[in-house]
Image (tube, helix red, strand yellow):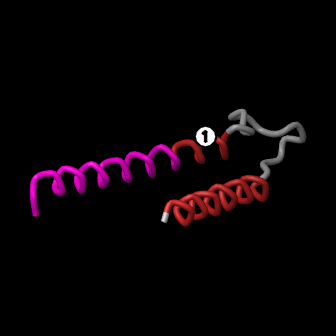
């Protein structure tokens, strides 16, 4: 294995981790966008909507991983 192959392998490893980190951060931001930090208008929390957003973010991360393969 020559030096060029080692450098390419290391670069791909670092870039893959950086891309995964960035995509995960972006999806987390998207899933939190609708939250204002306070309670909704009726004073009741909305766990169902929060669960739906988390599920959607998880599905989008999985989809992103599958498209990169």
- Tell me which residue sits at (74%, 59%) in the image: 52
Neighbourhood count class around disc 1 (C-alpha, 10 Å): few under 14, some 14–19, many 20 upward: few
Residue 11 in picture, x, y percent from top left: 27, 48
Q: Nearer the viewer, residue 6 or 47?
A: 6
The secondary structure that most of the magenta stretch takes on is: helix
Q: Secondary structure at mark 1?
A: helix
Residue 53 within the segment the image draws in magenta: no
Q: Which residue is mark 1?
A: 29
Position of 30 with respect to 7 (left or right) is: right
The image shows residue 55, relative to residue 7, as above or below, that is below
Q: Residue at x 84, y 41 (%)?
A: 43
> In the picture provided, is 1 more to the left or to the right than 59?
left
15 part of magenta stretch: yes
Q: Which residues are the magenta region? A: 1-24
Q: Position of residue 36 (x, y in %)?
A: 72, 33
Could you tell me residue 30's position as x and y percent?
Answer: 66, 42
Residue 20 at x, y percent in the picture:
45, 52
Residue at 10% x, 64% y: name it.
1
- For the point 60% across and 47% down, which residue is it? 27
């Amino acid at each position: 294995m020559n030096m060029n192959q080692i450098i390419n392998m290391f670069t791909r490893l670092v870039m893959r981790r950086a891309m995964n980190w960035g995509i995960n951060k972006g999806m987390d931001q998207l899933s939190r966008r609708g939250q204002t930090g306070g309670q909704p208008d009726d004073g009741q929390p909305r766990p169902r909507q929060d669960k739906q957003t988390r599920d959607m973010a998880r599905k989008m991360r999985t989809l992103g991983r599958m498209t990169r393969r």
